[in-house]
Amino acid sequence: MSYLKILTDQCSLCGKCVEACPFNALSQNLQLEVNENCRLCGICVKACPFQALVIERGAKPTANLKSYQNVLIFAEQRGGKLSGVTLELIGKGRMLASKLGQKLFVVLPGDRTEKLVSELKNYPVDAIFVYDHKELAYFRAEPYTAVLYDLIKELKPGIILIGATQVGRSLAPRLATRLRTGLTADCTILDVKPNGDLIQTRPAFGGNVMAQIITPRHRPQLATVRPKVMTPAAKKPSHPKQVFIREVKPEFLDSGISFLSILPKPQETSITEAEVIVAVGRGLKKAEDLALIEELAKSLNGMVAVTRPLVEAGWASYTRQVGLSGRTVRPKLYIACGISGAIQHVAGMSGSDLIFAINKDPEAPIFEVAHFGLVGDFYEILPALIKELE
Amino acid sequence: MRIVVCIKQVPDTTEVAIDTEKGILKREGVDSRINPYDLYALETALRLKEELGGEVIVISMGPPQAQAIIKEAYAMGADIGLLLSDRKFAGADTLATAYTLAQGIKTLGKIDLIITGMQTTDGDTAQVGPGIAEYLHWPHISYVTSIIKADLKTLTVTTDMSDTIETQILKLPALITVAKDINQPRLLSYKLKLKTENRAINIIGYNDLTKGEEEFFGLDGSPTQVERIFPPQHDIKREIWQGNAVKLAQCTIAKLKELRYL
Ligand SMILES: Cc1cc2nc3c(=O)[nH]c(=O)nc-3n(C[C@H](O)[C@H](O)[C@H](O)COP(=O)(O)OP(=O)(O)OC[C@H]3O[C@@H](n4cnc5c(N)ncnc54)[C@H](O)[C@@H]3O)c2cc1C
Ligand SMILES: Nc1ncnc2c1ncn2[C@@H]1O[C@H](COP(=O)(O)O)[C@@H](O)[C@H]1O
């Protein structure tokens, strides 16, 4: 691995490098020392009047793989509410840790976290690491990166899982870059080899392809995990666990970002929370006909979702789009009406517990995904269904 | 304001398929184009330039063919184009890509703002933008949905976090990745296309960036390895029902009752 080499013979302990280092990676006592904050930026090399510092470049960057053990998951909270993906990560993380005979840790940055900690204590995790500070209530890239980096440096986990949410997909790449390690985005399948290699599977090329990815030479291994795909952890309050409150050093909070406002969005419940979804695609002839879909959804206590062409036509809001570039949903019941079943749509709904599809075309690919396929016209079938339900 | 926009050439994903026998991507004959999400980034930069003056620089890492998308960006209004192209850059994952782009950006002198697309349609990772910001030690905000105010020192932006709308002030220099809702990208102008036909594209390689750091670039600098690719599969036991609407509706209700959904 490349590293910063100190030629002690040439060093006069003048301290210029210590001052110049933007990362507090250098310190001197009886002699100059470099710590793990060093990012090989070379600023100290330039600052040194005596050529006492050199960056030694090794072959391939490799970590001492064996020294990285255990699984760490990032508990995502926003304004004091735990996001659903956190429980899914605990479920998956527990499985991976058990398979490796290792421990499962959780890191929770937030503000006034007592309630969240007691919530997390219901689940089978071995330790919870808490960073509690007013300024950590909401996500900002640099403070969250600093906090996680602080813990990871010390804990040296082999695997780190972060939800592939808007927050996670902003945080994880920044963190992985600071750690100079691999990161696989938006995984839908995760497993582990006996040697600790995380087998990360994710859709690529717009869902046309699945890619299986490993990070064989670097530790920790980072993955973001698509929400609503993994099964959430079951409660297990009896599982012994420890809680560690970690110090939030002022420099962790350095950031070029400040909040002007955080306004709640007029909240229609999101389709990702719905237990029943009636979805419609381009089989819909005109926007007004959405009323028919609404009616069925209402009688099933569900919500309406759509395919992308309907959003593009301006017939429905983007928040209703299911699929690769829309939301991933996992309701108990999904009824697809007039949807062909393009791979990009299926990517967002194939995890549903029970899928019904109505399509005029018996060859439509949606029938390969549906548990029950109805060949026919939904303009005729839905009114009949609604009538039966009354 | 000097703004860098990162653009990437991607295959038209609707045409990408897998050769199931060989387990490789069939990319021959597939059209290439500018990553559609990067058009929003370019549009954002052009509007900022129109408001505040300055310069829009597009940068791309890729094979020499990627000059085509830089020409396209010129025809939309970009001023300068930089292509990072070298065999040593090949095989880069997002860590190495972000490193290479950050090194490339460092050759450009003082930059106020970097804008990337929210993700690519081939990699779909959304990782390169934040990675560049980390390498440069700049703040970043991902998935920006609008820019409310901009001057040479700060940018006021909003992001849509599904449960909240957040408005944040970002100190420059900084990086943002932009969501699709931010604007409607302009079309390529035929007049500009003619005018910029002969405008140069700066092509720089490994030796122009740095010396002796091979292990950070391309495959060597990429911790992740693709082990295999395979087509998505659905193995579901399915039943297909045919018949008249009323009968189908009755079957559905019966099934839902049987499975205790009703
Ligand atoms: C990068 C990328 C990302 C994408 N992301 C998404 C995404 O997130 N979500 C998404 O949905 N799409 C997405 N798409 C688009 C996707 O490829 C398809 O174009 C889209 O899903 C098709 O929508 P559809 O099924 O409604 O329309 P069509 O494919 O046109 O299918 C309409 C179906 O309705 C049937 N039909 C018509 N009339 C009736 C009737 N009266 N009764 C019964 N059946 C009827 C027809 O037989 C047909 O099968 C994406 C594409 C790309 C390239
Ligand atoms: N090779 C590249 N050259 C230039 N920009 C890139 C490249 N790869 C990624 N980007 C930028 O980073 C964004 C996110 O890409 P990705 O992380 O691959 O999803 C894209 O929208 C581009 O703006």
Image (cartoon, coloured by chain):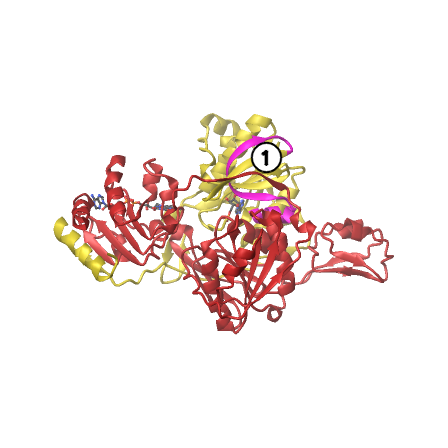
Q: Chain A, which colour?
A: red
- Mark 1: amino acid: Leu
- How many numbered circles does the render carry? 1
Q: Nearer the viewer, residue B192 or B200?
A: B192
For the C terminus of chain B, the quadrant is bottom left
Hey, which quadrant is residue B215 in on the image?
bottom right
x then y, percent, for residue B96: 58, 53
Q: Nearer the viewer, residue B58 or B88?
A: B58
Read off the chain for label 1.
B
Q: Chain B, which colour?
A: yellow
Hey, which quadrant is residue B186 in on the image?
top left
Residue B68 appears in the picture as rendered: no
Q: Nearer the viewer, residue A198 or A70?
A: A70
x then y, percent, for residue A309: 32, 41
User: In the image, is residue A349 part of the stretch drawn in magenta?
Assistant: no
For the N terminus of chain B, the quadrant is top right
Q: Nearer the viewer, residue B157 or A83?
A: A83
User: In the image, is residue B148 part of the stretch drawn in magenta?
Assistant: yes
x then y, percent, for residue A175: 59, 54
Q: Which residues are magenta?
A: B130-153
Q: List the residue tagged with mark 1.
A: B155
Residue B117 appears in the picture as rendered: yes
Residue drawn at 21 percent across, 59 percent down: B257
x then y, percent, for residue A6: 79, 60
Determine whether the residue tagged by mark 1 lies in a helix, strand or loop. strand
Looking at the image, is B207 positioned above or below residue A216? above
